[in-house]
Every structure is written in structure tokens, then in C-alpha cells.
Image (cartoon, rainbow, N blue to C red):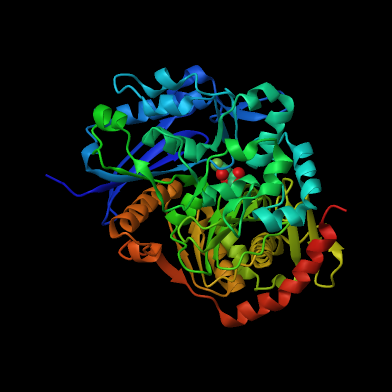
Amino acid sequence: MDTQPLFLGLDLSTQSLKAIAITSGFQTAAEFSVNFDSDLPAFRTHGGVHRSADGLTVTSPPVMWLAAMDLLLDRMKQAGFPFHRVVALSGSGQQHGSVFLKPGRQERLARLDATRPLADQLKDIFSVSHSPVWMDSSTTAQCRALEQALGGPQAVADLTGSRAFERFTANQIAKIHQTRPADYNNSERITLVSAFAASLFIGDYAPIDVSDGSGMNLMDLRNRCWATPALQATAPGLGDKLSPLCASHAVVGTIHRYFSTRYGFPADCLVIAFSGDNPCSFAGLRLQNPGDVAISLGTSDTLFGALTQPAPSATEGHVFASPIDPNGYMAMIVYKNGSLTREDVRDRCARGSWQEFNAALERTVPGNGGHIGFFFKDPEITPPVLTPGIHRFGPDAKRMTAFPADHEVRAVVEGQMLSMRLHSSHVGIRPCSVLATGGASVNQGILKIMADVFGCAVHTANQPNSAAFGAAYRALHGWTCSTRKRFIPFAEVMRDAPPFAAAITPDPENHALYSRMLPLYEEREKSVLDS
Ligand code: 5FX
């Protein structure tokens, strides 16, 4: 009979709750999931959320997350999952979302009754019954007010790691305080989705880990403590309502007897601080050395990078405390125009075929004969551009209304890679290796350009559940630090993890060419920004 210890990673994302168990030898022992829309139809969510008629306010009912936890654990029990082998667990939560708890609810968490489901006994603990989530964009006024109070967007970025963003928790809390003061005043505790989920497992208010805490516009990024000026500018008395901060590898408690009695977890199972989904993906992709970069090519493109010196920017990206290194940082840059924009060019210029698309890349040369394009099929986040459109520049720097089809194909790929190199350098990323993930990372033509633009080896990872794996890895990391009674580097804990797939190496001449092209690209980019 298998008796190996297990490490459990939970992932409370926008649409689903997942669990992945791994062994210390990095074997995946089990995977389970609950989909909010289809498994819990009574909550009437679409994609796990409710939207206001104008689409700006987006929330999820926190009771649904409790019901999902009941259902997930029941499913695991029915399937015979060996809960008794779980020595540590951690979790990932969608970032920025907030949970508001009524006074005295700590008691209720402590006294959970193992004969009843969580949703049944905790359904009335919330002072705000619909939690704002990251898709909410209704708080522009609160963002401007925070920036004004703290000295402008760059000042907010310097202090907290990001300028004020609508989805960031400070601005959501400010809105609740302004529009529903009674609910705000009736909140004893305000916490993040991640820390709320951890609270269930320890039967107490859990701290917020510094990595997810960096996504709130409330944390002093460098000193890893709440930033008093940001708290004061957000809402009165906020400092007393927020959970304290903790290191991401910290043990936040041992499992509450509810879970050992009802499901069979060992009584000494450790609960490691839960964190946000992006920090957990960063851990799942094992970006453990400064200069490690991951690029996820999906519906939206995202770049993560490990940093030692943060350089937060008011115009691009976010800097968070690292979820795996108590002195390190992670940067994240998000692009709205990803796969759909590449597919649009494929359909227009390569007869809808990736094979034709790659043949067009083969027929053109690095640098694209001086053709540079900016493809904003949708409003873009990086750089911030509100008006969709395609901007093309010919070799003589003059604007063009169209490119020959093959040049258009190369321009959409080179443009995105140059943009990633440019904007990631602005937040302090100095890439040493790149890990490509997501749907388009199977495309060798795209990977070759990525390697040449960044000038470093590109590996690939086919790991769709990186946040859940990251949570499981963090459970293993926190458990290792706790049992050895000192901080053990994440890289050491992950030493025997299976390597990522073989690398594509850059061509030094092409890399030199792209380095010369970068200032030109930057100049053209400035000319296409909204005036
Ligand atoms: C990051 O800043 C985001 O808003 C999203 O990636 C959410 O974390 C998704 F859950």
C-alpha cells in the first residue's frame, strides 16, 4: 500500500475550484475539480461571476466558494482520496478579490461542527454578500482619488508595486466604504480570497501572504508591511480590519479538527499561507532564479519575471513580492492582445493555417526588412491604448495602410516579442532564460523569434494547471522550511522536479539585430499611443 506523504494544492479561481495532490517525488497523485456554473447552478453565475447591467461591477457570492469547498472535498472522499497522507496543504486564490466578514465570526470559524457542511454553518458570516472580484472595473474614481492622495500614479507604483488599478483591492474597498458605509462599518475583518480560503482550513482568520498582498495597492512593497498612507487614503479604520501580513512560505496553522474528523486529514497537517493565482503560477513554473522569465501565450499574453531589484512603473505591469523568496520580487506584465490577435493575422494573411503562418515566417528575415507593426485588435493594457487599431510603419519610417501578407505575419510576432522585451526591461527584468507556456508555445516559429529577441534559451512547459501545481509546490516548500526549522531555498526543494522540455537557442546575430531595432520600436510605439 502506498504510504508516501502528499502535498495538496487547492486553486480557487474565478470559474472553478481544483485540487492537485503531489508526492515529494513530484508525481501527480490526484486531481479533482468543481465548476461553479455547472456544478453549483443555484448560484446562477456565468463564468463564476455576476455582472451588473453596465458590465462594470463584477462579483461572486462567497457562499458559493464555501459550497464548492464542500462539494470538492466530498467528491475526493467518495473517490477514496487518501486524506490521511496529506502532510501539508496550500492554496491559490484569484487575485484582488475581497471577502468582508461580520464581527465575531472568528468564533464561528473556530467552532466548526464536523457533522455539517461549511456552507450550512458559515453562510451568514459575510457583511458583503457579493464579493468584488478582479474583473470589476467600476472603481476609476477611487483609483484617481488614491493617486491624488499619494502624489500621482508613479508614487502609488513606487510605494505599492503598481499604479492604482480598478481591480486592486484598495479601490474596491474604498467603493464599498463610500457606497455602502453600513456594510463597511459592519466588517470586522476584510481579507483576500486566498487568505479567506486558508481561514477555513485553520478555523481562524488567516494572514494575507505578502505576494497576494502586493495586489491590493495597500502594501509597502519594499518593507512588506501595510502602507499607512495608502490605508488612510482608502477608508477609515482600515488598518484594524485587514488581516496581518505573513511570508508566503509561512505555516499559518495546523488543520482544524473539522477537516480531520470529517475527511480524515492527519491532525498535524500543516496549512501553508495561501497566495494569489499569479504568484502560485510563478511558483508552478519554478521561476526560482533572478532573470528567470515565463511567457504564457494565451487568450491574453502574460510575462512573469523573477527580480532582485524592483522598478515599479506607472505605465506598465505590476511588481509583487515573490511567493518563493522572502527577499525577491516577481514582475508581471499582461497583454490583452494575445492569441486572438495572432489568429486574426493568421486568418487574413495565412489562409487560416498555422503551417502557412510559419511558412510566411520562414520566407521573411529577422527585422522584417524594417516593417514594424502594432496590432491592437482590442484596447491594450501594455502599453495602455484605449482605441483599437493596427499601426504599420515601413522601412522608411513612414506609416503604411497595409503590409504584404508575409511581412504582416512576421510583424505581429516580432512586435509582441519586442514589446515584451521593452516593457519587461522597464520594470527591472533582465532575462537569463525564458519558459514558454500556453497554447501558442507549441509554435516553433514563434519560439525562435522569442529566443532571438530575448537572446536567451527558450524552454517549454505544458502545464495547464500551473496555479494549482504552484500551490502544491508551495505546500512542499513551506512544509520543508517548517520541518527543517529554517528557510530552505525553493530551488533546493524543487531540485528533483522533472526538467522542462528542451531549449531553442538564440542566434547571436539575430539577437544583435533585434537589440539595434529596439530603440526604433520604442520610438514608433510612442507615436501610436493615445494622445
Ligand atoms: C491579475 O492581476 C489578475 O487580475 C488576474 O490574473 C486574476 O488574478 C485572475 F484570477
Relative horizontal placement of residue 502, taking residue 227 as reference (left or right): left
Rendering coords of residue 395 (x, y %) = 80, 72
Q: Quadrant of residue 59?
A: top right
Q: Total label count? A: 0
Residue placed at 70% from the left, 64% from the top? 407
Residue placed at 33% from the left, 30% from the top? 73
Rendering coords of residue 83 (x, y %) = 25, 37
Q: 361 or 62: which is nearer to us? A: 62
Rendering coords of residue 117 (x, y %) = 36, 21
Q: Quadrant of residue 313?
A: bottom right
Can residue 299 be seen?
no
Relative horizontal placement of residue 249, taking residue 436 as reference (left or right): left
461 vs 275: above or below: below
Residue placed at 39% from the left, 24% from the top? 118
Can residue 355 be seen?
yes
Residue placed at 79% from the left, 43% from the top? 144
296 vs 40: above or below: below
Residue sitting at the far bottom: 509
Rendering coords of residue 198 (x, y %) = 42, 38
For the N terminus, give its image quadrant: top left
Relative horizontal placement of residue 274, taking residue 181 as reference (left or right): left
Quadrant containing ligand 1: top right
Relative horizontal placement of residue 145, taking residue 132 as reference (left or right): right
Residue sitting at the far left: 1
Q: 169 or 378: which is nearer to us? A: 169
